[in-house]
Image (cartoon, rainbow, N blue to C red):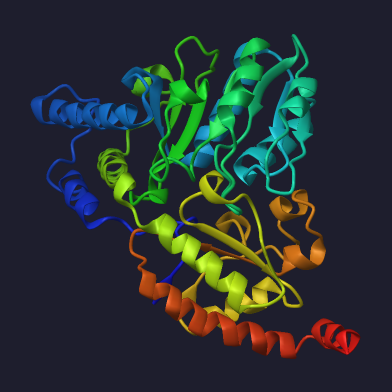
Amino acid sequence: MLYLDHAATSPLLPEVLDVMLPFLCENFHNPSSVYKPARMVRATIDEARQKIAAVVNAAPDELFFTSGGTEATNWAIKGVLAATGKRHIVTAQTEHHAVLYVCRHLEKNGYTVTYLPVCGEGFVNPADLEKAIRPGETAVVAIMLANNEVGTIQPIAGLSEIASRHGVPFLTDAVQAVGHIPVDVEDLGVQMLALSAHKFGGPKGVGALFVKKGTPMYSLLQGGAQERNRRAGTENVAGIVGMGAALEISARDMAMSKIPTIRDELIRRISTEIPHVKLNGATGASRLPGNVNFSFRFIEGEALLYNLDLQGCFVSTGSACSSAALEPSHVLMALNIGHELANGAIRFSLGTGNTPKDIDRVMEILTPAVEKLRNLSPLYDDFLKGEK
């Protein structure tokens, strides 16, 4: 198996499983109970909260556990709207559906949303954000830190400064960034930040929302007093413990990671060995360490994905949350590359388990697959006739 879809989900780190298992078995107690074993479980949750907060440079009491990134972004947007009574949102066209679909839902209920365009590499123009904010009306700006499809790392600090000058809270979806690049909420200048454990070697079904002190925020769920009365419900103890361990490991190993080198080699090999391709997104330090997104002209990305799948090479045509959709990626269309190139895109996302030898294997599978599909393509046949 050649797994190159870590942006969709990453395998659980063995060390993380080890620390989780006791909380699935003998340490099963409800952390809201008052007897000694339950207090021990509560202390373990607090310890995990401190670990995660330290990595993103937040205060522990600014961190709230959720079921994942989708819940975190939903809560952040709806919570600020409910707390402020304002009815305007600013976001970007290239956001994850966990933000875009929330905005579309809110539009149906009388809210207004401004969707900022991006340039060909996926960056938001700060001048566009400045123009979009409506004094006294805009409740929140939501722009992701790193794009899940093309890997572009947004200059969030500059954008959040604009929102701050207008007194508007800033949310950044950092699900693809945390655990892979340094993330500091103070340096970013954001009031809210979402993260998800399974993107950096932790378990599925657990995430967190950072909410800076003083940010207007309505409680997500009513019921018990968990998460300081902000999110009722018995905590996912094993998941929280696993997330703390996974992020601590990822942050420790980040500086020694070989993933950027492997990424650059894959980009070089595809660019030089396969004709008629286009790299999508930003380059160099402005790109996520493990992200490689190419459009292969004259073929459908879905067809290429299935050909790779048959040979044990697992990739994606875009976001895992919408990979079954047949329409072109909204991210690639926002980059203005056109339908043909958008439909021919494949995302390779690397993780800690990948090695330089994997690149040789990828090319052994990818090159003939592209050639085979192009030979079946009427578009490619017409192109060759035009060259003659």
The residue located at (20%, 52%) in the rendering is 15
Percent coordinates x, y for residue 331 in the rendering: 70, 51
The image quadrant where one finds the N terminus is bottom left
Percent coordinates x, y for residue 244 in the rendering: 28, 38
Vertical position of residue 220 compared to residue 182: above or below: above
Toward which corner of the image does residue 250 lie, by quadrant?
Answer: top left
Task: Name the residue nearer the viewer: 261 or 153.
Answer: 261
Percent coordinates x, y for residue 291 in the rendering: 52, 56
Task: Name the residue nearer the viewer: 285 or 232.
Answer: 285
The residue located at (46%, 17%) in the rendering is 212
Classify residue 270 as left or right of residue 12: right
Percent coordinates x, y for residue 57 in the rendering: 36, 24
Toward which corner of the image does residue 97 lie, by quadrant?
Answer: top right
The residue located at (20%, 25%) in the rendering is 33
Classify residue 286 as left or right of residue 244: right
In this rendering, does residue 222 appear at all?
A: no
Toward which corner of the image does residue 73 lie, by quadrant?
Answer: top right
